[in-house]
Amino acid sequence: MKTLARFSVRRRWYVLVAWVVLFIGLNIIAQVTGSAFSNSFSLPGTNSTHALQLLETGFPAKSGDADQIVFSVKSGPLKNHEAAINKELATIAKLPEVSGVTSPFCTSSDPHCAGAVQMSKSGKIAYATVNFSKQSNLLGKSDIRAVETAATTLRSNSLEVEFGGNAFGSLSAPTGSPDEGFGLLATAIVLFLAFGSFLAMLLPLGVALFAIGIASAATTLLSHGLAIAQFAPILGSLIGLGVGIDYALFIVTRSRQNLRQGMSVEDSIITAMNTSGRAVLFAGATVCVALLGMLALGFSFLDGLGIAAALTVLITMMASLTLLPSLLAFQKLRVLSRRERRKMKANGPEATLVQGGWQRWAVFVARRPRTLSLVALLAILVMAIPIFSLNLGISDQGSDPAGSTTRMAYDLLAQGFGPGFNGPLTVVGSIHNSADKLAMEKLDKNLQGKPGIAEVLPLYSNPQGTVGLITVVATTSPQDRKTGELITTIRDKYIPEATVTSHTAIFVGGATALSNDFSGVLDSKIPLFLAVIVILGCLLLMVAFRSILIPLTAAVMNLLAVGASFGLVVAVFQWGWGSSLIGSGSGPIESFLPIIMIAILFGLSMDYQVFLVSRMHEEWVNTGNNEDAIIHGQANTGRVISAAALIMICVFFSFAFGGERIIAEFGIGLGGAVLMDAFILRTVLVPSLMHFFGKANWWMPKWLDRVVPHLAVEATDDVA
C-alpha cells in the first residue's frame, strides 16, 4: 500500500490524467453505443412461465405488451364520444409497433365483439386495449409516446383520458433522482462543518462524483452483455455516493490528523493510505463480496444488479486509493483550514490522543456496558417489529403517486370493473385432442361463482385450436394476499379436478401470477443467501482481526441492522406511515428488495465495523490493554464515523423523493439502517459488548491462527 500511495503522490499528474482520460473515454463510448437496460427476468420451470410460453406460442399477437387507454365521463353516457374515440383508435392502430387496438364500442351488427367487456355497467368508464408487438422493455419510448400523444387529443372538459400498463408506465419512470441535489448539498454542509475547509470538503465529494461518472458509463456498456435492470444506474449512484464519499472521508480525515501531528505532506498521505487506505481496501472488498454473493442464487435478474453495483463500488474504491492521494498531494497544507494552519504554526503539532466529546462518550460506554447493551438491543428490536407483517410482491400501478396518469387509470378501472380487474389471471392450456378441450371447458364452467372470483370470461382458443385461454378476474386487487391464495387454489384444486382424466397441461399466468411466483422463488433463496453472506463476512473479518468473537458479533449486528431497516420499510411503504410525504402509495414490498438490501447492508455495516475495530485493533497491538484499546479506538473514530453516517443518510434519504418507488424503498431502508447502525450499533452496542467480552475479543485458537492467512488491515511503519 505504501508503494501505491507513494506513486500516486509523486506521479500525481500521471494519475490525474489517467483518470480523466478514463472518464472521458468511457462516457464517449457509452454515449455512442447507448444502453440496453432491461427489467425482464426469467423464472424457468415456474407455473406462470409455462403459461407465458404457451401464450406466446398460441397467441403471438397477445405476447407483446397489452396496455389500456381509459376513458371516463362525469355526466352523460360515454357512448356520446364513440365516433371521436373510434376515429382516433383507428389512427393509433396504424402506428409503429402497434399490433392491434380493441375498441370498447360495439356495433349493432356485431353484438358479441371482443370489446363488449371493456365497457363498465354504468356506461361511464371504458377502456381500449392497445396490443404492442413487443414487451414494454423492448419498445422504444418514441413509439409508446406516439400512442399517448394521439389519444391525449381526445381529452376535454367532458372526457377524461388516462393511460395504464407497463409501456405507458415506462414513460414516467425517472432516470435519476430529482432530489439528489439536496442530498449532495446536505453532504457538502456536513463535510464543511467536519473539516472547516472548502477545499477539504470538495475532495470526498468530487472523487465520489467523478467515480460515479465512470461507473455509470461502465454500467451502460455492461448492459449490452448482461441483463441489467433499468433502475440499476440510480441504485449504483445511490451506493456509489454513499461508499465513495465515506471512503474518501476516512482517508482525508486520517491525512489531516497526520498533518496536524507534524508529518510532512507526503508522509501524512502515505501513512493515511497505509492505515485508513488499507481499511478502505478491505471494506470495499467486503462490499463487493457481499454484492457478488447474489451470483450464488443463480438468478439472472439479480446477477446483473449485483455485478453492476459491485463494479460501482470497485471503481469508487480504486478512485479513493489512487486519485484521492494524488489530489491530496496537489492540495498540500490547504487541506487544513486556515484556523488549523495558524494553530499549528503557533502551538506546534497536536497530541495523538483525541480529547473531547467522543473521548467522554467512550469512557461513559466503558463504565456501563451491560445497561447500554440492553437499551440499544431493545431499541433495535422494537424498530424491527413491523417485519413480522412483511408482504413481498411486485407493486403495481396502484402504488404509483396520486395524480399520475397510470395511478388514475388504475383507480378508474378498479372503480368501473372491480379491484381485481387490474391484475387478471390468464389460465392457459395446451389442447391436443377433444379431451383437452373438454377439460378446459369444464374448468371454465367450474370456476364460475367460486369464492374470490368476480368474473370468468368464456374459453377462447387460437385459430389453430391448439391453445385455450380463460381470463379470470379476482374479487381482490392484485396486491392483496387473497389474490395470491386464489392463484394457489386454482392451481392445486380447480385445475386438478378438471383434468383428472385428461391430464391436460393447464397453467395460471398473467402479471399477478408471475409476481407471485417471483416472490416465492426469491423467498426460498433468502436463507441460502444469508448463509453465504454471513459466512463470507465472518471469514474476512477473522482474517483481518485474528479473532473469533469479532466476526460473530459483527454478523449478529448486521442481522439486527437488516431487521430494523426492513421494519422501517414495512412501516412506510406497506403500512403507509408517511408514504404520502415521498409521493408513494402503500402496497407490497418488492420481492427482490430483501436480497439486494441484505447484500448492500452487510457490505456497508462491515465498513463501519472495519473502520471502528481496525483502530481498536491498532491500539490493542500497541498496548495490549483491551479497555484502553476500545476507548481510544472509539474516541478516534467516533467523529468521522458519525460524519460519514450523516453523509450516507443525507444521500440515501434524498433518493426517496425521486418518484421511483423501488429506489425510494432502497433510500429509506438504507438511510434508516445507517442511522441505526452508526448511532446505536457501532456507537453503543458494539463497544459495550467488546468491553463485556474483555480480552476474549482478540482470541483465536493457535491451530486456526496458523491456518488462516495473515492480512493486516492496519499497518505499522514497517509494513509496506
Image (cartoon, rainbow, N blue to C red):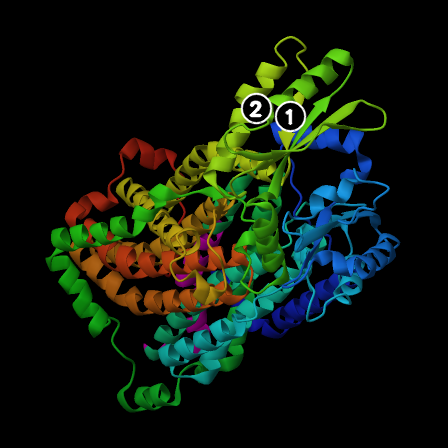
Q: Is residue 563 left or right of residue 442?
A: left
Quarter location, residue 490: top right
Residue at image location 26% in from the left, 53% down from the top: 621
Residue at image location 29% in from the left, 85% down from the top: 348
Residue at image location 35% in from the left, 35% down from the top: 706
Q: 48 and 17: which one is in front? A: 48
Q: Position of residue 511 (x, y in %)?
A: 62, 40
For disc 1, the neighbor class at 10 Å (few under 14, some 14 to 19, many from 20) is many
- Going by the picture, which residue comes out furthest to the left? 367
Q: Position of residue 450 (x, y in %)?
A: 53, 27
**Magenta region includes residue 282:** yes
Q: Is residue 85 left or right of residue 621?
A: right
Residue behind mark 1 = 507
User: Disc 2 versus disc 1: distance between alpha carbons?
Assistant: 7 Å
Task: Report the amino acid beneath label 1.
Answer: Phe
Q: Is residue 326 left or right of residue 567?
A: right
**Magenta region includes residue 424:** no
Q: Quadrant of the C terminus?
A: bottom left
The segment highlighted magenta reads 261-285
Do the CB atoms of the residues marked 2 and 1 lie less than 8 Å apart? yes
Q: Please tell me the numbered disc located at residue 491.
A: 2
Task: Report the amino acid beneath label 2.
Answer: Arg
